[in-house]
């Protein structure tokens, strides 16, 4: 059974600081997704990582994938308040479309 | 990108009544759609896979007689919560994948409150 673990689950950051969210998964996959969810809203796609060594950047967020280590990271650079949200990673399962991590609730404070 | 809509965006119903939620793919055809449920401050949990022209596939622990899924066309799937109870109150999100499952497009969600 595929398990997807994120850490930390809660993160309070000061504006301007850097931090990394980690996503580990238990079985082989060549694909990983990162989503953002604002309170009361649905998911917004951030990154689709398709291969080992994939790195994608959008603004202050950068995601990478190491399929051998079964690890993805979401790096936040110089955090701003607008990045406050819950971030989910997700991996395709065998018979299920996506298995989600528990999410990382990020709060950026002044 | 592709758009998936849901209707209604929120609904309040009384215990014992039934509620239907619609999920539509607006600019592409989706032979498969997925229904997720999200409780407050929790992650998304897959409830069922909706297949156009055939029966839905339910995840373990999801009552198929309670959560009726109909995939009537290539652009519409419906989830009916029958005999709703307060514990069914949740955020229901549908998604539709591209033909190669490269990407999933999520609907805006439906917040169900059962009183």
Image: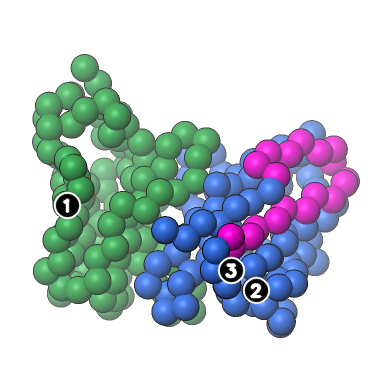
Residue A103 colored in magenta in the image: no
In the rendered image, the quadrant that contains the N terminus of chain B is bottom left
Colour scheme employed for the rendering of this structure: by chain
Name the image quarter holding residue A78. Answer: top left
Q: What element carries label 2?
A: loop
User: x and y percent of residue A92 in the render?
Assistant: 39, 71
Residue at screen point 29% across, 29% down: A82
Residue located beneath label 2 in the image: B74
- Is residue A73 visible to the viewer in this orientation of the structure? no
Q: Which residue lies furthest to the right in this view?
A: B16
x 72%, y 61%: residue: B78
| Colour displayed for chain B in the image of the structure | blue
Can residue B108 be seen in the rendering of this structure? yes
Q: In this view, does B30 lie above or below A11?
A: below
Q: Name the residue under label 1.
A: A57
- Which stretch did the figure color magenta? B8-26
Residue B83: % across, % down:
85, 52
Mark 3 closeness class: few <14, some 14–19, many ≥20 residues within 10 Å: many
Task: Name the residue beneath numbered marker 3.
Answer: B33
- Picture residue at 36% right of the left edge, 45% below the top: A36
How far apart are the alpha carbons under marks 1 and 3? 29 Å
Q: How crowded is mark 2: few (under 14 residues within 10 Å), some or many (20 or more)?
A: some
């Amino acid at each position: 059974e595929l398990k997807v673990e994120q850490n930390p689950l809660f993160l309070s950051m000061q504006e301007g600081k850097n931090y990394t969210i980690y996503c580990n998964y238990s079985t082989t996959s060549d694909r990983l997704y990162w989503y953002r969810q604002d309170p009361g809203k649905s998911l917004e796609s951030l990154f689709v990582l398709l291969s080992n060594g994939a790195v994608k950047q959008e603004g202050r967020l950068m995601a990478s994938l190491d399929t051998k280590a079964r690890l993805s990271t979401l790096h936040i650079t110089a955090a701003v308040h607008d990045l406050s949200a819950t971030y989910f990673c997700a991996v395709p399962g065998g018979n299920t479309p996506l298995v989600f991590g528990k999410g990382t609730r990020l709060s950026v404070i002044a | 990108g592709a758009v998936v809509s849901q209707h209604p965006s929120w609904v309040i119903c009384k215990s014992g009544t039934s509620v239907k939620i619609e999920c539509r793919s607006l600019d592409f055809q989706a032979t498969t759609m997925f229904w997720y449920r999200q409780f407050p401050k929790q992650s998304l949990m897959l409830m069922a896979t909706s297949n156009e022209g055939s029966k839905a596939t339910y995840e373990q622990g999801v009552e198929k007689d309670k959560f009726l899924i109909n995939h009537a066309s290539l652009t519409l799937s419906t989830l009916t919560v029958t005999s709703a109870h307060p514990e069914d109150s949740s955020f229901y999100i549908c998604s539709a994948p591209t033909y190669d499952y490269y990407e999933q497009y999520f609907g805006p969600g439906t917040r169900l409150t059962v009183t």
